[in-house]
Amino acid sequence: MQFGLTVGDSINRIEQTADPFDFVEFGLTELSPNCNEQRLSHVLTQCDADLCVHLPFKQVLSTPVPEINEAIIAHQSRLLSWAGELGAKKAVLHGAVRDPYDTDQRSTFASQLEAVVEAGQNAGVEVVVENVGHQRNGMQLSVLGDLAEQVDASVCFDVGHAYMEEGNDGIDRFLKYHGDLISHLHVHDARRRGDTHIPIGAGEIDYSIVTDRLSDFDGTVAVEVFTDDLPLLVDSADRAASALGSDRNLSLP
């Protein structure tokens, strides 16, 4: 099991916070790659950190328009090729659709997801689709699990997003029925009043559910807490490790 950190598109944040972690999850914008590749590679080497990426989060995966869908696949394929050339292990893809309540579009979403997963395989990058059902364009949690299973896609399960959508019961249901699809975790805490991406232990998520349902998990775990306070980030990683049955403790540099 590897523990990492989401860093947005900031190489400076990698320099400041990545040392205790096994990998970073670097965010790509819609105009990416627009970073200094040489500097990014140098900083990753300095921190001895592997690379994962987060594909552009503003872009939906499918629409009712075939020409737009083709362009989405071409765009994501280009970014995955770039990520593969830099040695990225995984790429997180938001499970977003133009209208998540249009049931006629679910088959299109599945086809689009399958195509992006295949593009990732061609680039040597594992694509993991993330649950964002609490957002306006996010595919509903249970539907996302069914469609990912249909096309044999791995899942990035965001514990906090699931809580914001369906509470602790929703976390439990997804892990019960689709836990075997999860290759990558986003961990943080949240409160139903709207606070999210806060340190684990500061919110209302029952992480004992994760303990019960993911006792055999051996994938990657990314701390997605919106702070640069390194002790808080490391503490959340240690709490996540404990919830997952790992005795690993990250040490501060």
Image (spheres, helix red, strand yellow):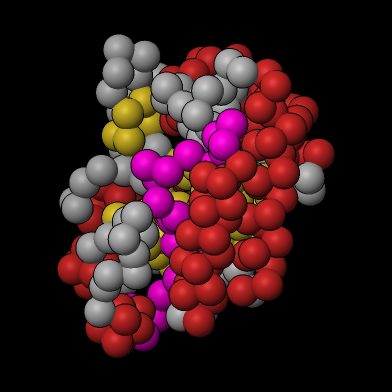
Residue 128 is covered by the magenta coloring: no
Give the x, y percent position of residue 196: 32, 29
| For residue 144, side relative to residue 19 (left or right) | right
Residue 51, quarter of the rendered image: bottom left
Give the x, y percent position of residue 43: 28, 81
Which residue: 50% across, 82% down? 85
In this picture, is 102 found above or below 34? above
What secondary structure prevails in the magenta region?
loop
Give the x, y percent position of residue 80: 53, 67
Residue in front for this viewpoint, 19 or 147: 147
In this picture, is 78 found above or below 148? below
Give the x, y percent position of residue 28: 36, 59
The magenta-colored residue range is 45-65
| For residue 143, side relative to residue 30 (left or right) | right
Residue 53 is covered by the magenta coloring: yes
Which residue: 57% across, 36% down? 65
Q: Quadrant of the C terminus?
A: bottom left
Residue in front for this viewpoint, 59 or 48: 59
Which residue: 79% across, 48% down? 152
How many numbered dots are placed on residues in this image?
Answer: 0
Residue 205 visible, this angle: no
In this picture, is 242 found above or below 218? above
Residue in front for this viewpoint, 164 or 72: 72
Residue 9 visible, this angle: yes
Q: Quadrant of the N terminus?
A: bottom right
Which residue: 34% across, 55% down? 30
| For residue 197, side relative to residue 138 (left or right) | left
Residue 31, quarter of the rendered image: bottom left
